[in-house]
Amino acid sequence: MDTLGTRIRKARGSESQESFAARLGVSKGALGGYERNENLPNSDIILKICSSADISVEWLLTGRNYEHQETEKCSAEGQAEFPPSCGPDCCDKCLGLYMKLDIAHERLFQAAERERALLTELGELRAELSLMKSMTLSPRTAASTGILTNSHS
């Protein structure tokens, strides 16, 4: 499956994680987390990856379109819809798209955090259920362990 992490790995090419991470300004561990799809890079890191590897933002995020950037720059008049080579300072249209990208990234991060919390809660509930099942003893077993009390006395 072609994921963001696999595309980041492809963008790195034969360069070492340590070297590529240094160029991006992140730790080798952070880059490894991105490549293993454990963490999501923020929009600044995504732009640095694209710039460093000469790839389009669209390809990195979606896997669609050609990997290498176009050389034509976006103009304030809007000659291009959103060329991959346009930087965050290019034009108002692009700035708006970068802001939307940041918002989408934040929502994705929040959803991932919520998923982690739900998975933790699920694990706790399963452990509690398992404990409750193990505590459901037959009357004979309960009597021999002293758990059974005589409530009729």
Image: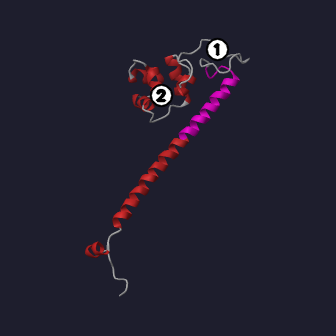
Up-down relation of residue 12 to residue 150 (above or below): above
The answer to which quarter of the image holds residue 26 is top left
Q: Is residue 129 magenta?
A: no
Q: Secondary structure at mark 2?
A: loop
The answer to which quarter of the image holds residue 101 is top right
Residue of label 1: 73
Q: Which residues are magenta?
A: 87-109
Question: Observer-nearest residue: 62 or 98?
Answer: 62
Mark 1 is on which residue type? Answer: Lys
User: Predominant secondary structure in magenta?
Assistant: helix
Residue lying furthest bottom in this view? Answer: 153
Question: Observer-nearest residue: 30 or 55?
Answer: 55
Colouring style: secondary structure
Q: Position of residue 135 (x, y in %)?
A: 34, 67
The answer to which quarter of the image holds residue 108 is top right
Q: Is residue 73 visible?
A: yes
Numbered marks: total: 2
Report the residue at 31% width, 75% height from top.
Answer: 139
Mark 2 is on which residue type? Answer: Asp
Report the residue at 49% width, 18% height from top.
Answer: 53
Q: CA distance from mark 1 to mark 2?
A: 28 Å
Residue of label 2: 2
Residue lying furthest left in this view? Answer: 144
Q: Secondary structure at mark 1?
A: loop
Question: Residue 135 vs residue 72: left or right?
Answer: left
Q: Earlier in the sequence, mark 1 or mark 2?
A: 2
